[in-house]
Image: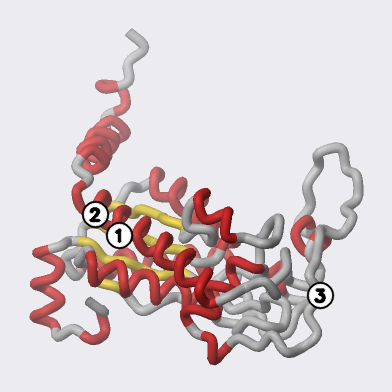
Amino acid sequence: MEWTKLTPGALKAAASECGLAVLPLGSIEAHAGHLPLGNDTFKAERTCLEAAEAEPAVVLPPLYYTDVASMRPTIGAISVRLEVIIDLVLDICDEAARNGFRKILLVSGHGGNASWLAYLRRRLLDRPPAYLVYTYYIELLGGEANRALMETPFDGHGGEVETSIALHLFPQWVDLSGRIEATTPAESPDLAGAMTPFDWPIRWPKAISGNPFPATADKGKIFYESNLRQLVACLRKVKEDTATPRFKDSFVRQIQEPCLHNSPS
């Protein structure tokens, strides 16, 4: 069920019957030169739509824009400030709740979203809304058992697994004919455990982590369908979840009356 393709009456019925809205989160960034700039968003939206066919939920229009500041030296990246992204996502959640959805699942197809999603979850503790927000990341591999399909030792960004998924989902937008260098991490400065904002682009300056050439659509189908089954299971569990709503209600009562509920004795 796609939010924008439903009539108002159908949306109202869906909110009442399934109660779950899903927001696909992606990015606009390079994966070397062979994958489309919208790769992460295409993947997230497709997985959400197919999962919602198996386990009914309403899928909001995908959010292409996110923080990809580390990718700004590459062509095509569009990066938005973190505070803007977080406020936008919370506004979308507020609006979904206003339309009757008591649970909202944020499904990310871009690994870089993890940091701000963690902050968003923390921010929701300050003033818990009437609805619940869950977050979920679509893993590339789709399960450890699928590692046996890989011909390369690793894939973090635009390598064998991610390119295989793209060849399965949207081969018309994949171009492996150009000059693409399979990469291993570049040498990073020894800072005795200290971290900087440049850690990822220093290690992967060509926007690729891995080797895309062993990728095939057949392998991509297996990776993708594993991811799809996992997301379907997640939708089902989120819809069935009664423990988190009960805990949230208790949590809100305690922070509203701290002296009564949290006395040292």
Judge whether 41 appears above or below 155 on screen.
below
Q: Is residue 241 left or right of residue 265?
A: left
Pick whichever, 173 or 177, lies toward us: 177
Q: Is residue 229 left or right of residue 139?
A: left
Tag 3, which secondary structure? loop
- Residue 56 lies, in percent from the top left, at 20, 66
- Residue at coordinates 83% horizontally, 61% vertically from top-left? 202
Asked if the residues shown at circle 1 and circle 2 are in contact, with their CB atoms under 8 angstroms apart, the answer is yes
Q: Is residue 252 left or right of residue 125?
A: left
* Disc sitting over residue 232 in the figure: 1
Q: Which residue is mark 2?
A: 236
Q: Quadrant of residue 126?
A: top left
Q: Quadrant of the C terminus?
A: top left
Pick whichever, 263 or 103, lies toward us: 103
Q: For mark 3, does the 10 Å Cα neighbourhood hold few (<14), some (14 to 19), or many (20 or more) residues? A: some
Colour mapping:
secondary structure
Q: Quadrant of residue 230?
A: bottom left
Does any portion of residue 88 appear in the rendered image?
A: no
Pick whichever, 50 or 16, lies toward us: 50
Q: Amino acid at mark 3?
A: Glu
Query: What whole-number distance in Å separates the C-alpha atoms at marks 1 and 2?
Result: 6 Å
Judge whether 136 appears above or below 67 on screen.
above
Query: What whole-number distance in Å separates the C-alpha atoms at marks 1 and 3?
Result: 36 Å
- Residue 39 lies, in percent from the top left, at 55, 78
Tag 2, which secondary structure? helix
Q: Amino acid at mark 2?
A: Arg
* Disc sitting over residue 181 in the figure: 3
- Residue at coordinates 70% horizontally, 75% vertically from top-left? 213
- Residue at coordinates 35% horizontally, 53% vertically from top-left? 134
- Residue at coordinates 69% horizontally, 85% vertically from top-left? 176
Q: Quadrant of the N terminus?
A: bottom left
Does any portion of residue 264 appear in the rendered image?
A: yes
